[in-house]
Image (cartoon, helix red, strand yellow):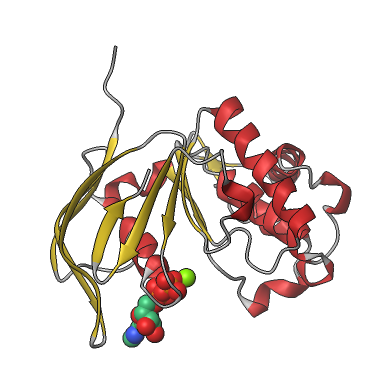
Amino acid sequence: MSMPEVLSFQSVSLYRGNKVILKDTSLDLPLSGIILLSGENGAGKSTILRACLGLTSLQKGNILFAGNNPKDSRKSVGYMPQSLNDDALMIPAINHVASGIDGTKWGFPINFKSKRKKAEHFLHMTNSLGFAKRPLGFLSGGERQRVGLALALTGEPKWLILDEPFSGLDHKSQDEIVLLLLKLVKKLSLSILMTSHETRSLDGIVDHVVELEKGQLHVRI
Ligand SMILES: Nc1ncnc2c1ncn2[C@@H]1O[C@H](COP(=O)(O)OP(=O)(O)O)[C@@H](O)[C@H]1O
Ligand SMILES: [Mg+2]
């Protein structure tokens, strides 16, 4: 039996301006199933996710993703940021997803037609094919999150990092996203690290809960 891979925080200190987000924090989290990072607004959840992706540097210590530093594991991680760039609002969903697909295969450029086919595959996986041609700005919050998930899947990641995938969604759309995440975990053997302050939809589906409080990470489940 193999040991589960871990996300390892090793004596991590992380500050933003004069705000302490993590202070000399050490913790190993098993990378399996769905891990929820909770904590108050402004506590630093998004910043921690960005540090796990190598997009923000630490003041001290290391974060290791299954033994690799964040920049080296970037290829195995799909990321859905908290909010969409305004520039993206006029882009049709399918083009948005296609933008995540590498334009080369075995060193040869792949044409837009095969990119579209691949994008359609990921839209299908997130139940989004029905509005593939619509610009993102004309989609509901839940539809837009599903397209965001399709984009996060384009690199065929082992892990997904999702920042507030439920923010601004009504209960019905939240439940749809939850079902979709469970399907992805099962079908693609993905693990998910996500933040949310909306935990109603998550009862019974998360495998681990970690709370960020006063610069420390506390394992709750
Ligand atoms: N680039 C930055 N420069 C200075 N302060 C920042 C920067 N980014 C975030 N912050 C501050 O860091 C804190 C944590 O922000 P964030 O990670 O977005 O929290 P959360 O996701 O938990 O709501 C907030 O107080 C925010 O104002
Ligand atoms: Mg946030």
The percent coordinates of residue 41 (x first, y second) are: 46, 75
Can you say which quadrant of the picture contains the C terminus? top left
Q: Residue furthest bottom?
A: 18
The percent coordinates of residue 10 (x first, y second) are: 14, 52
The residue drawn where x is 72% and y is 64% is 169
Can you say which quadrant of the picture contains the N terminus? top left
The percent coordinates of residue 17 (x first, y second) are: 26, 87
Query: How many marks do you count on the picture?
Result: 0
Specify the quadrant of the image occupied by residue 111: top right
Q: In the image, is residue 16 above or below residue 52?
A: below
Q: In the image, is residue 40 above or below residue 145?
A: below
The percent coordinates of residue 37 (x first, y second) are: 41, 56
The residue drawn where x is 23% and y is 88% is 18
The residue drawn where x is 70% and y is 54% is 174
Res. 53 visible in picture:
no
Res. 41 visible in picture:
yes
User: Left or right: where does residue 75 sit relative to residue 123?
Assistant: left
User: Left or right: where does residue 156 sit relative to residue 183?
Assistant: left
The residue drawn where x is 52% and y is 60% is 196
Q: In the image, is residue 109 above or below residue 5?
A: below
Closer to us: 99 or 33: 33
Q: In the image, is residue 160 above or below residue 184?
A: below
Q: Residue furthest right?
A: 130
